[in-house]
Image: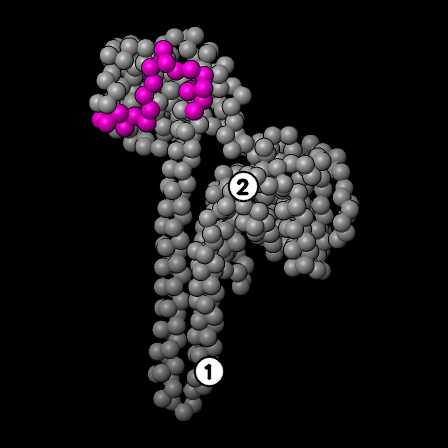
Amino acid sequence: MVDGGEDLLFAEEGPEDGFSAVRPWKILIVDDEVDVHSVTKLVLDEVTFEGRGLEFLNAYSGSEAREMMGLHDDICVVLLDVVMESMHEGLEVARFIREDLANSRVRIILRTGQPGQAPERKVITELDINDYKQKAELSSTKLYTSVITALRSYRDIRIIEENRKALENMALSVAHQVRNRLISISGFTNLAMKKGRSHECKVDEYLGPVIEESRILEGIVLAVSSYASLPAPKMRRLPLWPVVEQCVAELRQRYPDRTLELHKEAQVEGFEAVMDGTLAQRCFVELGSNAFDFSREQDGPVLLKLKSDGKCCSLSFIDKGDGMKEGVQSFIFDPFYTTKVRGVGMGLAVVDRLVREHRWELEISSVPGKGTTAQVHIPLI
């Protein structure tokens, strides 16, 4: 193992180290012809978008399509035939998706061999269909283009939805935190005013909490300002290793009395990913800082481990601290949630936002008394 130097250790993979790649984009193929399913998979089988492959789900009737949509809330694109059990079964499926399920995210590409059964302009206008293709005209290139365009649209919709939810949570959290502090400040100020009329009272004992609560409020304002000022990621193809090196250097500078061990289980120097290098580094540093803050020197070093299957790189921070108590993990990404005495609780909220905006995946597992592992799964290109 390495402590503090620039050398790297190629560690042996332990049985506890489960590697999971990022999830693929789910495509639902709805058609009553088996050959259509086979050809579609053949054309799109090797397609990737933002480092993620495609996972195909199959439905051979309108009823099967409804069942699939009910079981999977993360389907991105539906390639939908019109004529199945009935002449307009596909249109009824589209209506079910938009109206009964109230799912406006999934992109619906209508494919028909009988265009007269579903007039294009009327269908697209009334049923919120995102694309309309005649099977006879749908070449492999056009199918590829339609699916990539649909995935890009789905991605953007999800980003908007997730950011809106994050802002709503932020607003509620800020209101709650500020209200609590203002109540405390008001209460101690009123006590100081009342007791101050007595010559025997020392007003300082009431002003101390007012000052402390004001300090906390200032920290909240600074944390919100920092979170709100995060720029939109400028995504471009970058080598991953230099970003990791900069993260390691910053963490060792922040925690000079602690040990950060770096383990590589693959030659990651040549790996590239689509990301914003500056924001990616901040994301990794926040995760590393969290590992240091919730472990002690006597718990041993914090481990930064890099693994890859060639398609995805897993970056893990592992500490041997106290871990999280039962019930805590569901709150750790909430703004201002913290178990630290003087913490503001915005570090993991920042990580959650940056991971979502990069379309990465984050897994955090913790065992009380044994420590915590935080893994970021990064698609490679």
Relative to 2, residue 85 above or below: above
* Residue drawn at the location 43% of the way across and 7% of the way down: 35
Nearer to the camera, 101 or 353: 353
The verdict on residue 5 being magenta is: no
**Magenta span covers which residues?**
124-145
The residue indicated by pointer 1 is 204
Which residue is pictured at 66% across the width and 46% down the height? 242
The answer to whether residue 169 is above or below residue 42 is below
For residue 67, say whether it is visible.
no
Q: Secondary structure at mark 1?
A: helix
Residue 72 on image: x %, y %: 41, 26
On the question of residue 381 being in view, the answer is yes
Tell us which disc is closer to us: 2 or 1.
2
- Decide which of 365, 30 is in the foreground and name it: 30
Residue 90 placement: quadrant:
top left
Q: Find numbered disc 2 in the image and state the secondary structure of the residue it sits on.
A: strand
Label 2, residues with CA under 10 Å away: few <14, some 14-19, many ≥20: few
- The correct choice, above or below, for 346 with respect to 219 in the image is above
Q: Is residue 137 left or right of residue 209?
A: left
| Quarter of the image where the N terminus is located | top right
- In the picture, the quarter occupied by the C terminus is top right
- The residue type indicated by label 1 comes to Asp
Indicate the position of residue 365 as horizontal and vertical percent values: 57, 41
**Front-lying residue, 18 or 125:** 125
Residue at mark 2: 236
Q: Which mark is residue 359?
A: none
Looking at the rendered structure, the kind of residue marked 2 is: Arg
